[in-house]
Image (spheres, coloured by chain):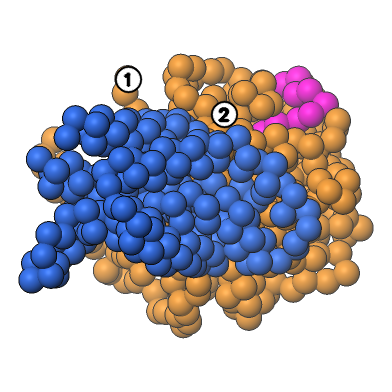
Amino acid sequence: MKNVLVSALAFTSGFVIMSLELLGGRLLAPYFGSSIYVWGSVITVFMLALSAGYLTGGWLSLFNPSLKRFSLIFFTSAATLYPLAMITEPVMERVFEALTDPRWGSLVAALILFALPTFILGLISPYAVRLLVVNVDRAGNTAGTLYFVSTIGSALGTLATSFYFVLWFQMDTIIFLLSGTLLILGFVSWIAARNR
Amino acid sequence: MKYSATLLLTLTVLFTTGPLQGRIIHREQSLYQTILVDDTGSRRCLQFSVRRDQRNQSCVDLKHPQRMVFTYTQMMMAGLLLAPDPQKILIIGLGGGTLPLALNDLFPEALIDVVEIDAVVVRVAEEYFGFQSSEHIKVFETDGRIFTKRAIMRHDQYDLIILDAFNGDYIPEHLMTREYLQETRTLLGSKGTLVANTFAQSRLYDHESVTYASVFGDYFNFKQYPSSNRIILVSMAGLPTLDLLKARATRWRDRLRAYRIPIHNYPDRMSRTIDWDRDARVLTDQYAPANLLRSRNRHR
């Protein structure tokens, strides 16, 4: 049961990360265009934030790892994602005024907007590994399964967002839905932790 | 039905692989697209893709360089019926440079700003299509949206703005939203004229039409066989009457003959009738799936 739950959580984090990354490129377009350097900025920021998140998530798993604490990561990620819808416009406007080169402009804007929520989402994978590993012999197998699940989530998040979500919803709505999903999953793992 | 489809296919194959097939004299991959220059007889064309069914983007008749080869390029000059004497002109999208050259020819004192994102297109236009920037024609190698935002910060205004940024393959979606058109409207001031080269087909037609209507209200919708383009014409000073359009067309008629622009035919074809689905969603920065909508058929 715990396996299924933690896997589902890892899947969702993968899904949200890539969905957000795609939205990131689109959110920047009105101010910085949609050229290759805008995607370069977005991907750079996501990679940096995720790497810092992995490092920190692994470190956090050293201290009394539990499903309950795991759920706190989800609450935090939901809370950092939600305000994006409100702050993108004013942030991009300031950066646009301060920096004339759209390469540096898009990089700085992406850093301000996406680094924090992506960092929090990066905490999830290593923490999930810690929760599911029962002995060293099977550690690689467990980590492999979690990578598999979360990367499948990333693939589906990319596909769903670029093929369908942008055709059905406003971008703010998509951010709201992603944030809401994280919140709900946080509650699910919170309740699961209490019932153990 | 099936036979006519087969016939059409046969004809298409004949015409695209037959004697009309030109000679590619230049091929270059840019950051954004593959650029081809193709000579067929005395006609030189700029193409933005390697696909055989891709239509030419911009052509010039080497024997008569003034002549506008494409119907849609001619149609965009209908903007002169709304703005008879533009002195500050902004063109988004260079192509082969046909429009800025013609406008510079007609209005030698006018200041023309051309925005082109692709540096390779600028170079190819100069090397193969006789385009040249000058004291009166300035080229800015940047994104159209970024240029527009910076121009607003500089408090620039234009008498005539021409949007021609979409090649056949891919639409830059941030240039087809309500917010972008609002920014463009700011640059038009209270008297400016906007001419936009847009799509006449697919579901995108409805979305694009309501988006323009949401920003500009009433506008002229101009379609003409055999072009599959639709030209939108907006005037911030209010649309002229049919009589005024005709009077202006008569005045331009002889002057534009060298360019092969049948401007006297235009006033009757510039329609104010709403022939789109008014319930289509307005395209915004939040909702801009222009390329996806373009692959959908209109439902009616």
Q: Residue at x 11, y 65 (%)?
A: A135
Q: What's the magenta region?
A: B232-242
Q: Chain B is drawn in which colour?
A: orange
**On-image quarter of the C terminus of chain A:** top left
Name the residue nearer the viewer: A170 or B123: A170
Q: Answer with the quarter of the image where residue B59 lies.
A: bottom right
Look at the image and tell me in which quarter the N terminus of chain A lies: top left
Which residue is at a point 22% across and 59% down the rendered structure image? A129
Kind of residue sitting beneath label 2: Thr
Q: Position of residue B175 (x, y in %)?
A: 58, 46
Report which residue position mark 2 lands on: B211
Q: Residues within 10 Å of mark 2 (few under 14, many from 20)?
A: many
The relative height of residue A99 versus residue A84 in the rendered view (above or below) is: below
Spatial separation of the CA atoms under disc 1 and disc 2 = 19 Å
Residue at 22%, 53% in the rendered image: A131
Q: Can residue B250 be seen in this view?
A: no
Q: Classify mark 1: residues with Cα within 10 Å, few (<14), some (14-19) or many (20+).
A: few
Residue A77's x, y, as percent? 43, 43
Q: Is residue A159 magenta?
A: no
Give the residue at x 64% y 36%.
Answer: B179
Disc ID at residue B300: 1
Instruction: Chain A: give its colour.
Output: blue
Count of numbered circles on the image: 2
Question: Does B240 lie within the magenta span?
Answer: yes
Q: What residue type is labelled 1?
A: Arg
Q: Position of residue A130 (x, y in %)?
A: 24, 59
Provide the secondary structure element on which disc 2 rests. helix
Are the residues flagged by discs 1 and 2 from a single subunit? yes
Q: In the displayed structure, does residue A151 sit left or right of residue A51?
A: left
Which mark lies nearer to you, 1 or 2? 2
Q: Residue B39 carries which label?
A: none
